[in-house]
Image: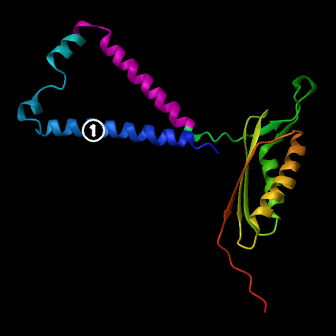
């Protein structure tokens, strides 16, 4: 799974937070008189900046437009955080004129989870289809117990479960990411 968007989000938010905290701290320090009593009581905009804003009628509308654009960009970013890329369903026919058969991605993922969940030592499975209907991708998270053989588990997923999915989707390949996670569990008693 690509972690790049999360890294960009963290870096961008950290930089934005640092800039806003520095600006807010400087404004608070100025207001409290840290830079001298004269600066604490003086206007924020200098006389030249005020004259520029008064002489150019476009200045304040441009500032307002920039603020609206920034607000809309922030809203778009916020809404993008909620998108998972999860597919609601898949169209099986490539030719829409012949008709369309839609298959629920949730049903496919459920069938795959049930199949892999029957493998020895598997405690929990989570399957998600992401991407597009034309290029679906599979994300599998498999939690297994100590007694399970992870190499055998991976082989069975690769050689049995994923080919069943490809056959159901009538595709030659479905890019797959499998995450195997060992979970602590009770060990079976040793027989002597």
Give how far across and how far down residue 167 sits, in percent. 90, 44
Mark 1 lies on residue = 22
- Observer-nearest of 163 and 103: 163
- Observer-nearest of 42 and 122: 122
Quick one: which residue is furthest to the bottom in this view? 192
Give how far across and how far down residue 21 sits, in percent. 30, 40
Any magenta on residue 78?
Answer: yes
> Does 171 sit above or below residue 43?
below
Tell me which corner region of the image, top left, top right, bottom left or bottom right, holds residue 133: top right
- Observer-nearest of 151 and 49: 151
Q: How many marks?
A: 1
Residue located 64% across and 72% down the image: 184
What is the chief secondary structure element of the magenta stretch?
A: helix
Q: Could you tell me which quadrant the C terminus lies in?
A: bottom right
Give how far across and how far down residue 189 sits, in percent. 74, 86
- Observer-nearest of 141 and 61: 141
Any magenta on residue 63?
Answer: yes
Quick one: which residue is furthest to the right in this view? 98
In-image side of 12 versus 5 (left or right): left
**Render colour scheme:** rainbow
């Amino acid at each position: 799974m690509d972690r790049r968007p999360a890294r960009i989000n963290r870096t961008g938010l950290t930089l934005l937070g640092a800039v806003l905290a520095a600006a807010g701290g400087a404004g608070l320090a100025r207001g409290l008189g840290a830079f001298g009593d004269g600066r604490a009581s003086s206007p924020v905009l200098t006389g030249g900046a005020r004259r520029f804003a008064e002489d150019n009628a476009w200045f304040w509308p441009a500032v307002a437009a920039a603020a609206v654009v920034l607000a809309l960009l922030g809203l778009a970013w916020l809404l993008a955080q909620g998108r998972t890329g999860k597919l609601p369903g898949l169209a099986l026919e490539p030719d829409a004129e012949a008709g369309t058969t839609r298959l629920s991605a949730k049903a496919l993922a459920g069938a795959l989870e049930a199949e892999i969940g029957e493998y020895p030592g598997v405690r929990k499975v989570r399957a998600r289809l992401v991407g597009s209907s034309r290029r679906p991708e599979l994300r599998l998270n498999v939690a297994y117990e100590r007694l399970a053989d992870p190499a055998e588990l991976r082989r069975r997923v690769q050689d049995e479960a994923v080919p069943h999915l490809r056959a159901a989707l009538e595709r030659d390949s479905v890019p797959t990411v499998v995450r195997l996670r060992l979970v602590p569990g009770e060990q079976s008693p040793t027989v002597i």
